[in-house]
Structures are given as structure tokens and as C-alpha cells.
Image (cartoon, helix red, strand yellow):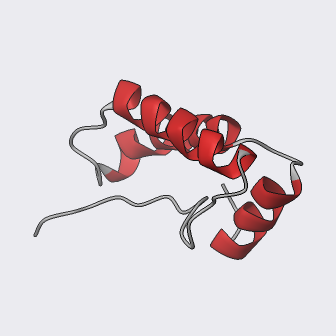
């Protein structure tokens, strides 16, 4: 995924994409790239999909929070 948060958010809020599509794209990128960089130990894909649906429902209702469309990963060191 080579878009910025602002680009993803603009696509999401304009209806040109849905949060579920964004989430699937990022999950696919993790699956494709993580093997070589080993940056992520665990991804709860079902939770990601569930949250994407919840966020999309809020977007559809006109209640998108300021971080709707943001993708976050937590890495400990």
C-alpha cells in the first residue's frame, strides 16, 4: 500500500472505497511482505475485518472519527 493516511481517508469519506477494502489491502500487504522483513508477529485478521465493518458503519452514518481510515500496528522492542 503506497498511499498516505490522507489519501486513504479521502477515498473512504468520498465513498470511492470502503474500510473493508482498505483493511483487506493492508492485510494482503502484510502477508506478502512480512516474510522477508518479519516485522509483525501476530495479526488478528478477523478482528481487523470486524473493526473495519464497524468503522464503515460509522462512516455510512456520517459519524467518521478523526482517525477513520487509519491503519495502526503496534510493535514492541
Q: Is residue 65 left or right of residue 46?
A: right
Q: Residue at x 54, y 69 (%)?
A: 67
| Residue 63 vs residue 3, the one in the foreground | 63
On screen, residue 24 above or below 61: above
| Residue 62 vs residue 36, the one in the foreground | 62
How many numbered discs? 0
| Residue 61 vs residue 28, the one in the foreground | 61
On screen, residue 37 above or below 50: below
Q: Residue at x 72, y 61 (%)?
A: 8
Q: Is residue 56 left or right of residue 30?
A: right
| Residue 28 vs residue 9, the one in the foreground | 9
Q: Is residue 4 left or right of residue 24?
A: right
Q: Is residue 40 left or right of residue 51?
A: left
Q: Position of residue 64 (x, y in %)?
A: 63, 60
Q: Position of residue 42 (x, y in %)?
A: 23, 38
Q: Position of residue 63 (x, y in %)?
A: 64, 58
Q: Quadrant of residue 53?
A: top right
Q: Quadrant of residue 10?
A: bottom right
Q: Residue at x 49, y 58 (%)?
A: 71
Q: Residue furthest left?
A: 77
Q: Residue at x 71, y 75 (%)?
A: 6
Q: Quadrant of the N terminus?
A: bottom right
Amino acid at each position: 500500500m503506497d498511499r498516505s493516511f490522507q489519501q486513504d481517508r479521502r477515498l473512504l469519506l468520498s465513498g470511492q472505497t470502503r474500510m473493508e477494502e482498505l483493511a483487506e489491502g493492508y492485510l494482503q500487504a502484510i502477508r506478502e511482505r512480512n516474510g522477508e522483513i518479519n516485522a509483525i508477529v501476530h495479526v488478528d485478521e478477523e478482528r481487523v475485518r470486524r473493526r473495519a465493518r464497524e468503522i464503515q458503519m460509522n462512516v455510512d452514518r456520517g459519524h467518521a472519527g478523526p482517525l477513520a481510515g487509519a491503519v495502526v500496528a503496534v510493535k514492541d522492542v
